[in-house]
Image (cartoon, rainbow, N blue to C red):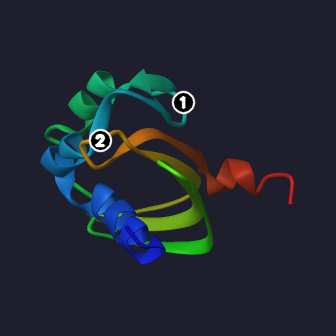
Amino acid sequence: MTEADFWKMEEKYWTGGADYARSVTRDDAVFVFPYPAGILGAEASMKGLEGAAPWRSVTFHDHSFTRQGPVAVLAYKAQAERDGEDYTALCASTYVDDGDGWRMMSHQQTPAAVADAGA
């Protein structure tokens, strides 16, 4: 996969809904979300997506990408919107090619209001 393919995959992770997210997430993935969600395993994170409206749109800024063999890390600032809700966060996702294709191993979000507090 090219770097552009990874960014497309990441965008679809935000906008593609629970079924898509589940299809590209490892069973042992770890998610770090703002309080009160906190640290979640894959199953808990996927259950949280069920019934939730996917983000209508997301744009990525301040891209950072690195890949070493079967591991790729994307870090970025996300601006997302859904049903009148605007959300900005600093994010990082790790994908691993585990033999069944590239799948998410971890994802972390820090809301920009918290991330920008010291700026």
113 or 9: nearer the viewer: 9
83 or 116: nearer the viewer: 116
Badge 1 marks a residue whose secondary structure is loop
Numbered-mark total: 2
Q: In this view, does 118 lie to the left or right of 31?
A: right
Q: Residue 35 carries which label?
A: 1
Q: Mark 2 points at which residue?
A: 99
Badge 2 marks a residue whose secondary structure is loop
Q: Quick check: 16 above or below 107?
A: below
* Label 2 Cα neighbours within 10 Å, binned few <14 / some 14-19 / many ≥20: few
Q: Can residue 33 be seen in this view?
A: yes
Q: In which quarter of the image is the N terminus?
A: bottom left
Q: Is residue 12 left or right of residue 33?
A: left
73 or 88: nearer the viewer: 73
104 or 114: nearer the viewer: 104
Which residue is at a point 86% across and 60% down the rendered structure image?
119
Q: Can residue 52 be seen in this view?
A: no
Q: Quick check: 54 above or below 35?
A: below
Q: Position of residue 91 (x, y in %)?
A: 56, 53
Name the residue type under label 2: Gly
Q: Where is residue 67 in the image (x, y as percent from the top left)?
A: 57, 58
Report if the CB atoms under discs 2 and 1 are less than 8 Å apart: no
Q: Is residue 25 left or right of residue 17?
A: right
Earlier sequence position, callout 2 versus callout 1: 1
* Label 1 Cα neighbours within 10 Å, binned few <14 / some 14-19 / many ≥20: few
Extreme right residue here? Answer: 118
Name the residue type under label 1: Tyr
Which residue is at a point 59% across and 63% down the rendered structure image?
76
